[in-house]
Image: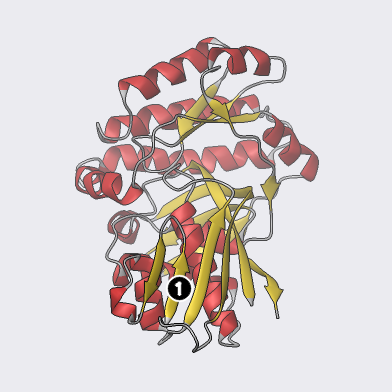
Amino acid sequence: MIISQTPVRMSFFGGGTDFPEFFKEHSGAVISTTFDKYCHVNVRELPDIFDYKTYLSYAQIEKVNSVDEIKHPAIRNAMKWLNLEKICLNYDADLPSKTGLGTSSAFSVGLLNALYSMQGITKTKRELADDAIHLERVLCKEDGGIQDQIAASFGGFNRIDFNSDGYTVKPIDISEERKNMLNGNLMMFFTGLSRFSFEIQKTAKHEMSKKTAELLDILKMVDTAEEILVDPNKSLDDFGRLLNETWLIKRSISDKISTNFIDDLYLRAINAGALGGKLLGAGGGGCLLFYVPEGKHASVRKALSGMLEIKFRFENEGTKIICSN
């Protein structure tokens, strides 16, 4: 039995510049972190005694005799790619899908990590990220950027840079004390709205081609955000204010990114004391993240009393195998 554990991520700055259509021409960068909410993939060989060759348990149950019969596109394509059948696979997660936290890419990374491990193959963090990108963007033909697969695989609080030659991952040079302070000033709430990110990204991809100036502004903010984080003389409150600036630009890129309901929630949090925030993920729903100075948490929590708050801590390990026997 093999069990992989893979964290989900929150992206602070640079979202949209991780689309190959953009960064291959202009370069791109994001600042993101993984945190302590995980996807778990449990796989083992299925004995011949069963009257089916593959058993899958995720949001659905599938029992099939041919890989081609599998409905789940990532599992189907991964198994065909790795020439696998006769497996039992169970998937569970700390958070539901369609929340804007990169759960689908975390699943892809964890799925490949588990399947490779079952075959006795060890892959590096970069290899797992690259293979997950290939699985989602090429084999499954899903639109979107490539930051989620990299974040889930590497783990940690990073700046990821993109260009025509590929990408680099650099941990943000921030002290543990300062990082803990930032963590303590962030609050996340589930809007109650779920959406498939690739559906939003398909529309946004078309509209982004006409929003180069906005994306270049978003890209510049990555440098500013990193300067705030690494300079102990700068106030972390500036990080929160910058979140507000990047959100205002991002929501102008496409009318699919925000809604009147989300805009109302955002304004309520700002009026209650949040300095800034953003909708995580592609847009249209999912989770709202806010930077809230100490002393204002209770008022923001009250202003968003109808929303589920998700408490979290940053993590540094990325995907890993937690059981192998």
Q: Residue at (43%, 85%) from the top-left corner?
A: 84
Residue 41 picture location, percent across and down = 56, 66
Query: Toward the viewer: 44 or 277?
Result: 44
Is 276 positioned to the left or the right of 212 in the image? right
Query: Toward the viewer: 121 or 242?
Result: 121
Question: Where on the picture, by quarter, is residue 67?
Answer: bottom left
Question: Where on the picture, by quarter, is residue 19?
Answer: bottom left
Secondary structure state at the residue bearing disc 1: strand
Residue 315 picture location, percent across and down = 68, 51
Q: Does residue 143 appear in the picture of this structure?
A: yes
Residue 270 picture location, percent across and down = 51, 15
Identify the image quadrant of the N terminus: bottom right
Q: Residue at (64%, 54%) from the top-left corner?
A: 156
Kind of residue sitting beneath label 1: Tyr
* Residue on which disc 1 sits: 55
Residue 254 picture location, percent across and down = 25, 35
Is 98 positioned to the left or the right of 24 in the image? right
Query: Toward the viewer: 227 or 136?
Result: 136
